[in-house]
Amino acid sequence: MRLPVRIGTLLCCLCVSMATAAQYTKPVDARSYNLGIIGGFAEVVRLGVKTLALSEVLAPEEMDELWPDALVVAERNGVRLYREDDFLVTDLFPADVAAGRHVLLIYTGDTLEQYLSVKADKARLVAEDEYAGTARRDIARRFGRLLSYPEAMIERLIDEQTGR
């Protein structure tokens, strides 16, 4: 049974709230923090709350250091990782969100193929000078759905990025 998206959103908000607390009783190093994010999202993906989740964006050297342990976390949680060094840029996020950086896609099943299909469709539209208007918005919508974002949130994020 697929859990409601709201549960996943609440879990994510809880993680963010805990991670951004003003003070910690002990210092939290970036590596542990990032592995914790990967572990949390891996569980949410495994449970079917999200189809696709993303790690923090990191410099390639930081990702090199994190990669072996991220694979252990993924295996423990029954999910797969894809190291993306050319992140799909859509109107969901600022265009430079991952410029020159790497991000891990956390997924199960054929989700990677779906992501790569959206990415290929965008590349084709760009090559044909047709990446505008409805076609551009549809690419962002497809990516948002892969991320299991609610439709209203997808539209809000697109509107925010496009200034509508």
Image (cartoon, rainbow, N blue to C red):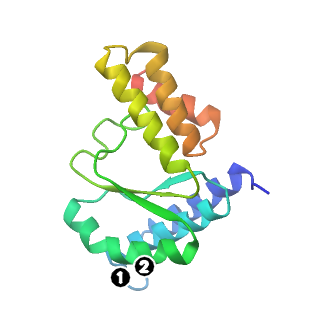
Badge 1 is on which residue?
27
Quarter placement of the N terminus = bottom right
User: Which residue: 64% across, 39% down?
Assistant: 150
Q: Secondary structure at mark 1?
A: loop
Foreground residue, 17 or 116?
116
Amino acid residing under circle 1: Pro
Amino acid residing under circle 2: Tyr
Instruction: Answer whether residue 99 is visible to the viewer in this image.
Output: yes
| Above-or-below relation of 101 to 21 | above
Foreground residue, 74 or 94?
74
Q: Residue furthest right?
A: 1
Q: Where residue 59 sits in the image (x, y, percent)?
A: 23, 59
Q: Where residue 18 sits in the image (x, y, percent)?
A: 51, 69
Q: Tell me where residue 25 sits by quadrant.
A: bottom left
Q: Where residue 50 sits in the image (x, y, percent)?
A: 61, 53
Foreground residue, 102 or 112?
112
Q: Where residue 146 sits in the image (x, y, percent)?
A: 56, 43
| Above-or-below relation of 49 to 124 | below
Q: Are marks 1 and 2 in contact (CB under 8 Å)?
A: yes
Foreground residue, 49 or 121?
121
Q: Secondary structure at mark 2?
A: loop
User: Which residue: 33% across, 78% down?
Assistant: 29
Q: Which mark is residue 24?
A: 2
